């Protein structure tokens, strides 16, 4: 920051012609998470902007290098804390790729269900918050109401509403509850109803449209050159979705569409997210239909999966298995993999390196938000200061991911 | 050198080698319990069974589970050979990972765990137990037997150092063979048969020879545990530093297992070295780590009538002043056969370069009961290294007492390791103008000192010991010394600086470079290593 300039002679004071430098954040209601923007303003027009994340001081990647592989889960929970289940699943898939194992079909479907539920909460939180920041408080409450319904399901399945730590290498912590299918089937029509209400309130609203359309345009070529992924990229008109482009967990067997925008403006980003929620609901419908009620959730390998607790207390074999996994950790073979999934905001990648021991040698994360955030500077530049709020809101930056 | 093939890999071997030994030399472990490279072959655990390719293999009738018929059906399988017993033959092909061999390993492992108690959470072996390791690598399933396990005696006192647990025992007889073959004392044997057998003591005997802790060390499971280490620490929290035993002049190679969180040494276990101790150590050697923590001196003290505690750095300043007050030529220097060569060398340089005194004496323990296995009659780890530092001429403490009587000595600068002489014998030292003792623990020499400066013990510094064979061996630092405390050699460098006559040696590399050529370690064995196995 530059020091405040003092004018030597007040009699010669004129309107300053050089840009005004202004701090927005790091503690500002519209700066989701904790991020700081240094703005150079010409009147109310933003001439230049410098976006600076990194105020959480987490060092999550380094922290991963001291526990076992399984102990990474609580850290990935807190990357994108709006959709922690997607991070859990992404990390599980990465380590499973390194181990060369694939979870049973029932578990894959379970992961799809939990993941899509998390995606709905992520998108609705983003759109709801953006509407609220533009003054539309009611749709925000509606969206958060849906989020709460979904959190009820996630709580029923995992025991926690937000940071579930529910993924496991080679499976999930627990099998699905008996009520899962019923709960999901019950809320799907209700979600649809809320989506309709929200759209009815917002997308025919002149003020809302004026605030969004042709604001914060991200052209296709810029989006690609910046490495932008997720709803932001799709709003710019490119149909890249990891679930379709590089299917995992059986996503290629589900019938769903990838919505794309054409202008790449804030309005498109809003609408792409709304439509993706509908597509997620479609996936959920198919998934609950095809998920078997019986069958294993975890792979059958004592080197990877903990034995049942009753057996640990009563047989020496299970005690040893438990001991080996807890004290020494699961030992993936020496090597490195890059594994990537569609997170809430784009391609969530893990580049993990194993030295053959029970502790990760390196857990490098490609957080979608961090990369998307860099494109924000281009989107904000030459817009008005008041437009920063919806533009930044439509990026859905999550601070937890952006702390390297 | 002739070779054979093990799982497709060429393994060279020396004539007389068995398959398992040749593989062991190459760093390949064929699963085993009863075989030990330092003991004779028992071939009783059957864990190391391998398949050897033959023109006309011996086939054995067996039953195999047929999942489709849901019953056992007759089948053939090749006869397997224990690789610990089978001699390596040039050109033969051995398979330790063929399906038949893996099957045999899994079933032997299942048998060994059949009656094993659920003891891992309270067993000291957990974390370095072969039953755990091989369950994961060779079995990975639960047992098929569902009846009550066989019960045997637990926590049987075998002697002052060892406790036996019959239920954990796999009857590999390593402990019996160790006592028979290394200590030539048939104190252990096996009694009963089948799943009732257990290790027992000879009638009227206790396990009380000088190498009892080795029986615990060779035990591949938690059947024998050391009373010294029992329930003290969990091994996965311990880190190991490569060290050399300071118990006697043999200089057995060992690991100091310490807990970095508590900064405390928990045990000593032997480190294989064919040229010195092979695989073994004696009980007294393995218990020397107690000396690191007992009566530890953590701060300096000055005696003006009563000893008075001062900070380590202040003790150095006071020592410099005290030594400056007496004629330099009348200052005697006491080397220590208990201290590292580095400490003794810098003390020798201190005498020649700072004081100009050549009155060198040697403090040392007076010897113990030696034997022809490992124990050397001289229970000082570094007498040769200390003597080499002063060119081989140092007088005894008895002669020092005579010199004090004759008035040739006014003050002393002392490496205060343990000595044969007790504080009462050394009482005349109290009459001197100054006795500056550098010591890590309370000894007779610190009790008669006027100024005590705390220094690092052998576990808290890296250094060199020269054993009775004249082999210089490097040892590593395990734990951190107390706050403000440094090795004796570094403290002497500080002392010289405080006396305004700095020594030329200031760094460990320079001190090492100045060691007499005959007492330099042939090669550094590398620094800290995290070793648990």
Image (cartoon, coloured by chain):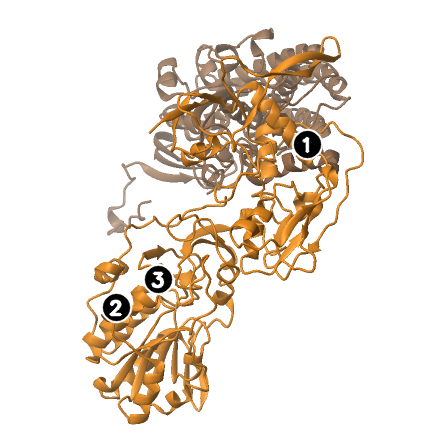
Question: What percent of the width, then of the height, locates residue A262?
Answer: 45, 10
Question: What percent of the width, then of the height, locates residue A260?
Answer: 49, 10
State the CA–CA distance, disc 2 to disc 1.
59 Å
Question: Crowding at label 2, few (<14), some or many (≥20) Cα neighbours within 10 Å?
Answer: many
Label 2 sits on residue: B389
Q: Nearer the viewer, mark 2 or mark 1?
A: 1
Residue A267 shows up from this direction: yes
Label 1 sits on residue: B111
State the CA–CA distance, disc 3 to disc 1.
47 Å
Q: Quadrant of residue B49?
A: top right
Q: Nearer the viewer, residue B440 or A65?
A: B440
Disc 3 and disc 1 in contact, CB within 8 angstroms: no
The answer to whether residue B264 is above or below residue B56 is: below
Label 3 sits on residue: B468
Q: Colour of chain B?
A: orange
Residue A31 shows up from this direction: no
**Chain that bears disc 3:** B
What letter labels the chain drawn in brown?
A: A
Question: Crowding at label 1, few (<14), some or many (≥20) Cα neighbours within 10 Å?
Answer: some
Q: Nearer the viewer, residue B457 or B14?
A: B14
């Amino acid at each position: 920051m530059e020091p405040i300039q003092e004018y030597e002679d007040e009699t010669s004071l004129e309107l300053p012609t050089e840009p005004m430098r202004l701090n927005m954040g790091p503690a500002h209601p519209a700066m989701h998470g904790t991020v700081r923007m240094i703005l150079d303003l010409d009147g109310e027009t933003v001439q230049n902007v410098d976006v600076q994340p990194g105020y959480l001081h987490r060092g999550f990647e380094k922290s991963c290098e001291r526990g076992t592989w399984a102990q990474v889960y609580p850290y990935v929970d807190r990357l994108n804390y709006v959709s922690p289940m997607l991070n859990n699943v992404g990390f599980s898939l990465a380590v499973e790729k390194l181990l060369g194992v694939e979870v049973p079909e029932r578990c894959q479907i379970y992961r799809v269900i939990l993941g899509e539920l998390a995606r709905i909460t992520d998108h609705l939180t983003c759109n709801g918050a953006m509407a609220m920041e533009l003054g539309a408080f009611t749709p925000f409450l509606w969206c958060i109401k849906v989020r709460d319904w979904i959190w009820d399901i996630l709580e029923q399945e995992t025991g926690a509403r937000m940071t579930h730590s529910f993924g496991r290498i080679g499976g999930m912590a627990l099998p699905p509850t008996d009520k899962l299918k019923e709960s999901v089937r019950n809320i799907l029509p209700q979600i649809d109803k809320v989506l309709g209400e929200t759209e009815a309130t917002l997308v025919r609203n002149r003020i809302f449209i004026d605030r969004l359309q042709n604001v914060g345009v991200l052209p296709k070529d810029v989006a690609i050159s910046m490495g932008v992924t997720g709803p932001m990229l799709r709003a710019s008109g490119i149909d890249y979705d990891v679930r379709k482009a590089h299917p995992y967990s059986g996503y290629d067997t589900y019938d769903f569409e990838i919505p794309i925008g054409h202008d790449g403006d804030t309005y498109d980003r809003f609408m792409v997210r709304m439509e993706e929620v509908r597509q997620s609901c479609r996936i959920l419908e198919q998934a609950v239909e095809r998920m078997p009620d019986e069958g294993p959730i975890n792979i059958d390998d004592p080197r990877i999966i903990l034995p049942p607790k009753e057996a640990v207390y009563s047989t020496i074999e299970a005690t040893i298995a438990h001991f080996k996994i807890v004290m020494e950790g699961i030992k993936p073979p020496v090597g490195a993999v890059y594994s990537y999934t569609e997170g809430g905001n784009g391609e969530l990648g893990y580049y993990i390196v194993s030295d053959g021991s029970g502790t990760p040698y390196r857990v490098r994360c490609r957080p979608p938000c961090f990369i998307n955030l860099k494109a924000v500077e281009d989107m904000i530049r030459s817009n008005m200061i008041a437009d920063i709020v919806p533009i930044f809101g439509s990026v859905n930056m999550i601070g937890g991911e952006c702390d390297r | 050198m002739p070779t054979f093939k093990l799982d497709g890999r060429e393994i060279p071997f020396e004539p007389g080698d068995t398959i398992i030994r040749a593989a062991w030399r190459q760093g390949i472990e064929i699963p085993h319990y009863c075989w030990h490279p330092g003991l004779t072959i028992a071939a009783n655990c059957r864990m190391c069974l391998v398949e050897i390719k033959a023109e006309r293999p011996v086939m054995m009738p067996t039953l195999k589970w047929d999942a489709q018929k849901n019953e056992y059906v007759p089948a053939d399988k090749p006869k397997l050979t224990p690789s610990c017993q089978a001699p390596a033959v040039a050109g033969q092909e051995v398979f330790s990972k063929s399906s038949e061999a893996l099957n045999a390993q899994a079933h032997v492992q299942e048998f060994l765990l059949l009656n094993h108690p659920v003891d891992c959470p309270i067993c000291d072996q957990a974390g370095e137990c072969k039953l755990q390791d091989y369950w994961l690598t060779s079995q990975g399933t639960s047992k098929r037997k569902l009846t009550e396990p066989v019960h045997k005696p637990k926590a049987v006192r075998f002697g002052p150092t060892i406790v036996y647990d019959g239920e954990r025992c796999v009857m590999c007889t390593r402990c019996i063979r160790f006592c028979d073959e290394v200590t030539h004392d048939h104190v252990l044997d096996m009694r009963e048969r089948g799943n009732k057998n257990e290790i027992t003591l000879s009638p009227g005997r206790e396990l009380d020879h000088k190498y009892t802790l080795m029986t615990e060390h060779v035990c591949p499971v938690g059947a024998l545990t050391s009373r010294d280490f029992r329930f003290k620490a969990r091994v996965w929290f311990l880190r190991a530093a490569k060290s050399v035993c300071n118990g006697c002049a043999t200089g057995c190679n060992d690991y100091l297992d310490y807990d970095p969180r508590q900064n405390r040494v928990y045990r000593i276990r032997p480190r294989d070295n064919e040229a010195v101790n092979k695989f073994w150590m004696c009980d007294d050697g393995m218990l020397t780590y107690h000396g690191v923590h007992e009566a530890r001196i953590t701060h300096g003290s000055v005696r003006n009538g009563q000893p008075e505690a001062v900070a380590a750095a202040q003790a150095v300043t006071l020592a410099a002043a005290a030594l400056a007050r007496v004629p330099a030529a009348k200052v005697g220097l006491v080397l220590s056969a208990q201290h590292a060569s580095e400490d003794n060398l810098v003390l020798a340089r201190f005498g020649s370069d700072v004081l100009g005194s050549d009155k060198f004496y040697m403090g040392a323990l007076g010897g113990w009961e030696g034997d022809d296995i490992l124990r050397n009659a001289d229970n000082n780890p570094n007498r040769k290294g200390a003597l080499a530092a002063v060119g081989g001429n140092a007088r005894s403490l008895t002669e020092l007492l005579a010199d004090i009587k004759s008035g040739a000595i006014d003050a002393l600068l002392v490496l205060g390791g343990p000595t044969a002489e007790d504080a009462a014998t050394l009482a005349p030292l109290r009459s001197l103008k100054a006795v500056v003792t550098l010591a890590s623990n309370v000894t007779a020499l610190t009790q008669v000192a006027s100024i005590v400066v705390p220094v690092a013990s052998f576990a808290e510094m890296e250094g060199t010991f020269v054993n009775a064979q004249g082999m210089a061996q490097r040892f590593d630092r395990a734990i951190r010394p107390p706050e403000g405390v440094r090795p004796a050699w570094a403290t002497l460098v500080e002392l010289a600086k405080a006396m305004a006559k700095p020594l030329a040696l200031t760094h460990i590399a320079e001190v090492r470079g100045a060691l007499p050529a005959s007492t330099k370690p042939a090669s550094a064995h590398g620094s800290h290593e995290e070793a648990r196995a």
